[in-house]
Amino acid sequence: MALHQASGRWKLGLLLALVTAACWATLPVALKITLEQVDPITLTWFRFLVASLVMFAWLAVRGGLAQFAALDGRRWALLAIAGAMLIGNYVFYLLGVEHTSPANAQLLIQLAPLLMALGGIFVFREPYRLGQWIGLGIIVLGLCLFFRDQLQADSTSAGGYLLGSAFVLIAAVVWAVYALIQKQLLLRLSSPAILLFIYALASIALLPFSHPSRLSGLDAGHWALLGYCALNTLIAYGAFAEALAHWEASRVSAILATTPLLCLATVAGVHALWPLSIASEAVTALGYAGAVLVVMGSTASSLLGNRKATTT
């Protein structure tokens, strides 16, 4: 079976990766506040439902639904596995956010693009040079420093932090599997078609465990945040899927590793404007050093790689 190759339009891939990073940096804050009035499963179901309806309408207007007719059994199986992995990612990540802070969850989820990068190397045979390996090592070191800082910050809540971290780590593993499967499926399906199937599967699978009637009790502010979470799904994963079509998975993952600092800035900004909406992050110099190392490592992985990259 042929392996997917990036188009080589790296500038477009870079832009789309940055859009994804910005969406993911602001999402944990919106999720944390929305969880005050919505349980994790219902929140996840609503996000998938809105995304599936919008994506269906988009593909129907553009005649993109016919793509599914040409799929063989193997591709249908890959689609089902990818859907299951993304459902797991959403649910476990949201459980992680519920038990820890937005920045903590966002930093720990950076293991997902690291795992995706390794998969891109070994599954798709993407080139990865010494400088990029050094960058990955720096990212891992930064994650370890931040994790240590958070454990020391409040020993009384260490149990909850560890539980939330465990949920996020599971979310990272299943996300990496999803991302690699999606990259392979791009040989036969467009990214909107792949996402439509996954969104529809998720909204159906989660419906029996959700409580849609509880949404009627939300106030205007939480409805606005819930809507943002749903739109964030469309924008972030649409941009991410297209980024994979134009740029190597290892390069996309390096850009996504800059998300934690953007999330820290988002938390600080929201707390400054609305102090009661979300608590400030308890991060010491050690934790900030770890976050900066993550960004430095991602930059090294992105810039110190294959110097023969296409410049179109």
Image (tube, rainbow, N blue to C red):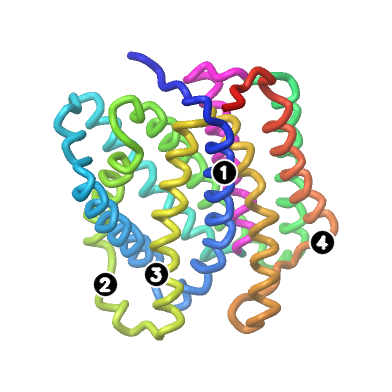
Name above or below for residue 122 compared with residue 256: above
How far from the left and from the top, in percent, is residue 69? Answer: 14, 32
For label 2, the SS is helix
Residues under labels 3 and 2: Cα distance? 14 Å
Question: Of marks 3 and 2, which one's residue comes earlier in the chain?
Answer: 2
Q: Tell me where the magenta segment starts and ends, as one range.
A: 102-127
Q: Which residue is mark 1?
A: 15
Label 1 – label 3 distance at C-alpha: 24 Å
User: Could you tell me the amino acid type at mark 4?
Assistant: Thr
Quadrant of the image containing the N terminus: top left
Q: Amino acid at mark 2?
A: Pro
Q: Residue furthest right?
A: 285
Q: Is residue 122 magenta?
A: yes
Instruction: Please give left or right for residue 95 compared with residue 26 in the image.
Output: left
CB atoms at circles 4 and 2 under 8 Å apart? no
Does residue 219 show up magenta in the picture? no
Residue at screen point 33% across, 66% down: 42
- Quote the CA–CA distance across marks 3 and 4: 33 Å
Q: Can you tell which of label 1 and label 2 is closer to the viewer? A: 1
Disc on res. 251 = none
The residue that label 4 is drawn on is 284
Is 160 above or below relative to 2?
below
* Number of residues whose C-alpha sits closer than 10 Å to that of mark 1, classed few (under 14), some (14–19) or many (20 or more): some
Judged from the image, the secondary structure of the residue bearing numbered disc 4 is loop
Q: On the image, numbered disc 2 is attached to which residue?
A: 212
Residue position for label 3: 227
Q: Nearer the viewer, mark 1 or mark 4?
A: 1
Q: Residue 59's spot in the image, x, y percent?
A: 24, 47
